[in-house]
Image (tube, rainbow, N blue to C red):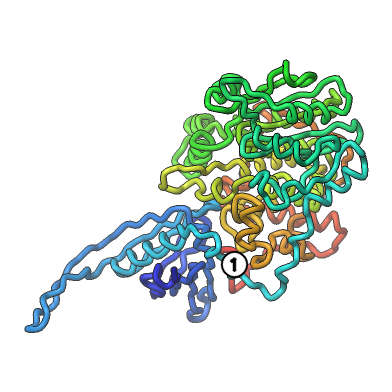
Amino acid sequence: MEFSELIKTAKVENVLLSGPGVPAVKGTLCITSHHLLLSSQPGGDGEQGTVELWLLIRNVDAVEKSVQNLGWYQSTRTNSSPRETRFASSSGTITLKCKDLRVLQLEIPGMEECLNIASSIEALSSVESVMMMYPFFYRPHSMKLEQGWHLYLPHHYYQQVVAETSAWRLSSVNRDFATCPTYPSAIIVPAVVDDEALRKIAHFRQGGRFPVLSYYHKKNQTVMLRSGQPLMGPNKKRCQEDELLLKAALCGRARGFVIDTRSAQAAKQARMTGGGSEPKAAYLGWKRLHRPLESRGRPLQESFMKLVEACNDPSLGMDRWLSKLESSKWLSHVKAALSTACLAAQCMEREEACILVHGAEGTDTTLLVTALAQVILDPDCRTLVGFQHLLEREWIQAGHPFHLRCAHSAYSHARLKQEAPVFLLFLDCVGQLGRQFPFSLEFSERLLLALFENSYASAYGTFLCNSEKERSLCKVKETTHSLWSWLNQPNQQKEYLNPLYSYNALVIWPSVEPQSLQLWQGLFLQWIRSSQYLDEAWAEIQRLVEGSETPTRTNGAAHSQLLLPH
């Protein structure tokens, strides 16, 4: 497929761009294989200078079009050709609803041009092939392809764990991704369990996701494991190797906890279709705790969509706004996720027990809980570098299916398939921690926003595909740039640091009471209201912390970028 086949009209003059918080500007609209560009040449004295819109087309979630001022005319008939009927004196409006939640309008002269532009954007934004996406074409001069990809490999963390205790070992049983297609090539397991046993356990766990170490608690020498559900089925099948692994994981301790992110009823129903949960009689010392979380599919995605719809409605009064906020149930999902992560952290920190976390597949709420628990427990995961390491280990390498879950955002009219904002829910929960403990996270809200945007549409290959196996097949690391390489450039890194940060070695226990949880205004309201004064306040805080004598001010430049050039 050639991109040129999808572009019906590549250039249109006199297009008017408008949107919330964006000054209306008229200029030339161009469509390329991956970007939508609008440029306005400077006018006379006192008029606005060149303004550019540079929008990654993959960022477009929905395209809506309307037509005004329709008219018709017929061309004069000749002997050799029939009359042609065409649109005359018509124009159209295209509304672009983006995955980063912004909404833009393009007023385009000419009915035919409007329809062609809309059709081109729809086609380009829905290209399915991963290898046709922008990261495979993006080549910035300031970066090299190999940079960033080896910064946060999981086996670096695993080697640290092996150095701490002889009870665990690194295994290469999955080096060719044959044992578990969604695990990385290197995993860490109890030393007494050999690779042949791991292969048998993989057949007994959903998706081959046998229990592996997620986190080692140095102080208490306890571990957090994650896996897929056991495939017991209605006949209550057992796997001795699986039971041995979990017994070995206890390291002689009296008890451990299985945190199942499904309800007891859902786990029971899963057993009737081939799944199930660990029975007490077979897994001595392990106690099962059910903490149901919405992991995927319609409920979580619709919650996200309802919240965005409410935030975008300026006509709502206080009562209706509060009603819509509550009916979206988004903050209820935040509360449930934080509560379950706190339970996992409490089991390790206060009960000094080992834990195993799983739901069904082990690729969604399982990772949500294990990653959040580590941010709560471990001060290293609250640093800028440590947090990136956590994301790489517990989300990207651990097999969260970003390509499926982030295919659409809150505006898409497409039928829901496997979309679910699980990663966004994690970022929101981390933001809640940052607001309750403003000195304990080294990174700021800007990093969380950047991660949200790049998980849905990016110039970088970090969030491409659904697993490390798929990224290997697509040669993502060989042919795209890493987001970590960009974030860790000195000029960029400074943008994402929290000026109030002070290292806190303690566990941070968040309040999950409704009064303590807040709407993430920096995300859900960022395109609805101006953040100028808040940005200026943070800049002043940064100046005071650094001891600078010159205050940072917001300058109005003649040339402004409405959207990031990615």
Q: Quadrant of the N terminus?
A: bottom left
Residue 405, relative to residue 560: is it above or below? Answer: above
Question: Residue type at mark 1?
Answer: Phe
The residue that disc 1 covers is: 136
Q: Which residue sits furthest top?
A: 281
Asked where in the image residue 482 lies, by quadrant, the reply is bottom right
Q: Position of residue 180 (x, y in %)?
A: 66, 44
Q: Position of residue 290 (x, y in %)?
A: 66, 22
Asked where in the image residue 519 lies, by quadrant, the reply is top right
SS assignment at label 1: helix
Please name the residue shown 51% across and 33% down the image: 299
Number of numbered callouts drawn? 1
Q: Nearer the viewer, residue 93 or 482?
A: 482
Residue 566, relative to residue 443: is it above or below? Answer: below
Q: Position of residue 284 (x, y in %)?
A: 78, 19
Q: Which residue sits furthest front?
A: 196
Q: Nearer the viewer, residue 78 or 503?
A: 78
Residue 525, relative to residue 348: is it above or below? Answer: below
Please name the residue shown 50% across and 49% down the image: 408
Q: Position of residue 489 (x, y in %)?
A: 76, 65
Q: Is residue 345 visible?
A: yes
175 sits left or right of 80 in the view: right
Please name the residue shown 37% across and 72% down the image: 9
